[in-house]
Image (spheres, rainbow, N blue to C red):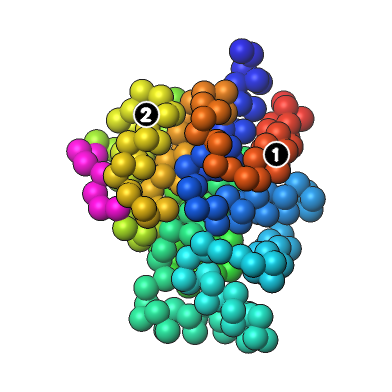
Amino acid sequence: MSKASLVEDRCRGVLVGLAAGDRIGGPIRMAVRLAESLIDCGRFDPSDILNRYLSWRREGAFDTGPVSERVFSLLAAGIPIKNVTAQVHHEFNGMTAGCNPTHRSPPLSMFAGIADNDLADFAMTEAGLTHFDPMAGETAATNNQLCRSLIQGVGWDEALRKRGRFVDQKEPGNNGGFATDVIRAAIYFVNQSACFDEALNRSLAFAGPSNYCPVLVGAIAGCRWGASAIPTSLLSHVDILPRVKAAAESLAAGWGASE
């Protein structure tokens, strides 16, 4: 496989892998809408992204996480957006550092039109559409930076060293939905596995019914090993797979155009 083909394969692997890891379906539906916004607008447009999330809610959104669902419900009720996330942060007693932004935002890493220097800021801005706690945005930024490095061909060990605090983990930690716990566990399983299916299957056993760690394992492992390394059997549950693949293909093509 040529260098350009490898870049595109790793890029596709982010979104296809996320779909493989998402066993309930909310994160991939949000990620696809974010990806389609980037494709249709040709840029990062937070207003357009939020409108797509709200449109999905009107269609019957599910598995968005409690923080995002509450934000969307208040916005639908006409509460001004500038007040919503702070209000929800108060309602949730300051516990708005969940993993939903980290789950849904990996398409940012896939979009060649976002400069490396802007990626973290954009990830934090996207997270801030729903989550007031900056930790939610910082974790989303870390994940997007890791995936971007891998897309660009940085080796796994070097890419991981750039995210310093996750190096040399001896265990996955806990299987809760706090953003930093989720990314810590996800990186552990990808780091300790030899292929995509091993990483995902180990994370599924660890997570149990919780749709936290495996979603992120899918995105990171898909990026590390590429979409071509994802067994079709691990995608049989994805009922929007053609839409996922179309968005992944379009974003991957952007890397060829940027050569």
Give how far apart the Cα atoms at labels 1 and 2 are. 24 Å
Taking the image as shown, residue 29 lies to the left or right of residue 202, namely right
What residue sits 53% from the left and 63% below the top?
64
Helix, strand or loop for disc 1? helix
- Point 50% across, 53% down: residue: 24
Q: Which residue is mark 1?
A: 242
Q: Residue at x 32, y 49 (%)?
A: 208
Asked if residue 220 can be seen in this view, the reply is yes
Residue 73, percent from left and from top: 59, 79
| Identity, as a three-letter code, of the amino acid under mark 1 | Pro
Q: Which residue is mark 2?
A: 198
Is 171 on the left-hand or right-hand side of 82? left
Q: What's the magenta bit mostly, secondary-structure-wise?
A: loop
The answer to which of marks 1 and 2 sits earlier in the sequence is 2
Q: Which one is nearer the viewer's eye here, 211 or 68?
A: 211
Q: Which residues are magenta?
A: 169-175
Amino acid type, mark 2: Glu
Query: Could you say which disc has been placed on residue 26 in the image?
Result: none
| Viewport quadrant of the N terminus | top right
